Image: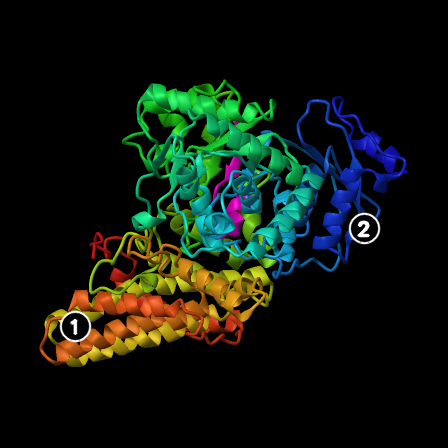
Amino acid sequence: MIMNRYFRCILPAAFALLMAQCAPADPDIRAAADLAGRVVPTVADRIEFVKAESPDSVDRFTLSSDGDRIVIAGNNAGAMAVGLNYYLKHYCLTEVSWYADEPVELPAVLPAVDREVTVDSRLDNRFFLNYCTSGYSMPFWQWRDWERFIDWMALNGVNLPLATTGQEAIWYNVWSKLGLTDEEIRSYFTGPAYLPWHRMCNLDGWQSPLPKEWLDEQADLQKRIITRERELSMRPVLPGFAGHVPEAFARRYPDAITTTVSEWGGFPAEYRCTYLSPADSLFAVIQKEYLTEQTRLYGTDHIYGIDPFNEVDPPTWNPDSLAMMSRNIFESVTAVDPEAVWLQMAWILYADPAHWTPVTAKAYLQGVPQGRMILLDYYCENTEEWKLFDSFYGQPYIWCYLGNFGGNSFLASPINDVEKRLDDVLANGGSNLCGIGSTLEGLDLNPYMYEYVLEQAWRMPDGHDASRNIIDRRVGRHDKSAREAWQLLVDSVFVQPSLCGQGPLTNCRPTLDGFAWWTVKPNIDYRNADLVHAWGRMLDVDSCSRDSYVFDCVNLGRQAMSNYFIALRDDFNAAYQSGDTALLRSKGCEIKVFFDDLTTLLRGHSGFSLKKWIDDARSHGVSPGQKDYYERNARSLISVWGPSKDLNDYANRQWAELNDSYYARRWAMFVDRVTEAAGRGRKFDDEEFYNASREFENAWIEPSNAIEYLEPLDGVEVSRRMYDKYAPLILAHPASYSPTSVPSHHHW
């Protein structure tokens, strides 16, 4: 009966239906059914998956109803997963978070699919992740977190995930085989949260040695990750050797052609990396050892992420030499895997436009045979490199939305501009456009943007409104107030891309004017009044307790309040400049009360808590000393970052306990010192406060400096309370939303 109806109603001429006699025996059906059992277990038995062929080789899913059952057909498990997500988003008005702790909330009755829907992919590759994400968001994840995240990627059509976990275990074996000692190898690695920058040849030895138990644990975790990803029709992008070697390697092989890479991130020379020239005969030897061992442990899908010059200089900028290096790297890979394709970040072109000119870029890219290198156009909501470099001279490329730097929690989602740019690249990007993806540095607080971008890789039915559907599923119904709030956000607030070095002024080391350093730029390109109005309309939604709605109420509120903090700080500065000490004390008290209020608001949703970050870090230790090691590593990344000021607060984020124990106390120190100086008729000493701040920051990262974890509060109730208090203040203070209220930053 089901099969007859399916053939009769939805079989297009080019779409042949295949059904196995015993559906569970098909691995794609089994993988899709298992996914449904994990994310919607209460209704999974009413969802039927059907295997279908796609003769034109595009991913395709079809939705239909049969009685009270939902039938999802697809050509593989990944397509079926996207079909399930389409049904959840557009019929059930719900969503599956990438976080395991956030619930999937379903309607009491599963809606029927009144008319069959068939959707094709329009691009073969849907990429996700960034080397940095494994540091800013995932360094301490256990399998439970990864399992939900992989399900989220499958539901959103990702089939090309970056898979960098567990590579240190392989490198340990390779360097051991080449004669390095245990101490030399583990001291070459960094602490867990910093491994992305170690892997990209930016940083060696910081917070080392890396415990041997970590290597073994992560290798086992990677096996589970890539097994599940492949079950869900993904091709994990595994690393290849890019040239980064331990300093001890250069000492043991003195005839090898090595160089010390350029300075990165303000780290002292002792942490700089060593690079082996691709022209050296040992390069191919190491590549073979690494890829052979990696394939033995993790298998291969023949696509390798190799990024030799991320934010560091190559040994030479000579175009012929750059072509030689890329050619030799590629040949070293294909000598081991003849089917290999090289995946390369085009971030290098954005990060150093002075050196990566059309001449040098063309030489480097064309050193690899056409079609065997795929470029990730990394930051397209800001700069589309495909337009600046002649569509990458014919090499395939993937248009990517970055969306977040450092895991920071700044509200930036330029949805209308992203839609226009995607329409443009799909129409005019050339035949070598081969995918859409996202390269977010951290899993930020605007998850719907990534779902929106990935949905554009599919040919949705006529009348499909992806933007409007976002807010409907955030509240679980069609709601007038929510839609009005969302429209205001899309038209007036979600207008600026995420910036490298961004965050609210609350998270910046305090100064009397401007902001202290490039890593926390609080500028906004919209009127804070518009955000406040959207926040108010969101709070007008009646009787909604959905988790995503509660999150949005807190999320909008903490950004609106943080924008207003610029005005509070400026008022404090004006009182200081005027010499009015009574007013100065009053304004200082307002700042302290503000931080208490912000902490209260952040307690309204678990997504704004520091606790999981620290608990996850400590969960890896097998002794108190190891647990402290991991916690120190976790704390330092989100605060001081490194030993110098260069990256201080780059990974800033608004988490209740971080706000309470770190940012609020730093601002209280500032208020007290400015007030004391004014009371004594002295000029506030910037340099002295800077030194005191560094001392406080470096003390905070120590686990002995205990953090008080705060009980959660009712997010909607505290949002309404903060709205009632701060909305009138914000609307009455025009400087709080002027984009010019923050002058250009100054350097310490």
Which residue shows up at 55% across the image and 63% down it? 616
Residue 181, percent across and down? Answer: 50, 47
The reply to whether residue 396 is visible in this rendering is no
Query: Looking at the image, which residue sits at the far left?
Result: 681
Residue 686, percent across and down? Answer: 17, 65
Decide whether residue 290 is among the magenta residues: no
- Looking at the image, residue 581 lies above or below residue 564: below
Q: Which residue is mark 2?
A: 46
Alpha-carbon span between mark 1 and mark 2: 66 Å
Which residue shows up at 43% across the image and 52% down it? 489
Q: Which residue is mark 1?
A: 575
Residue 607, percent across and down? Answer: 52, 63
Going by the image, does 580 lie left or right of 263? left
Secondary structure found at label 2: helix
- State the count of labels: 2
* Mark 1 nearby-residue class (10 Å; few <14, some 14–19, many ≥20): many
The reply to whether residue 419 is visible in this rendering is yes
Of residues 465 and 76, the one drawn nearer to the viewer in this rendering:
76
Going by the image, does 401 lie left or right of 177? left
In the rendered view of the protein, which quadrant contains the N terminus? top right
Q: Which residues are magenta?
A: 434-452
Secondary structure found at label 1: helix
Of residues 158 and 209, the one drawn nearer to the viewer in this rendering:
209
Sequence-wise, the earlier of marks 1 and 2 is 2
Specify the quadrant of the image occupied by residue 296: top right
In the rendered view of the protein, which quadrant contains the C terminus? bottom left
| Amino acid type shown at disc 1 | Ala
| Amino acid type shown at disc 2 | Arg
Which residue shows up at 55% across the image and 33% down it? 304
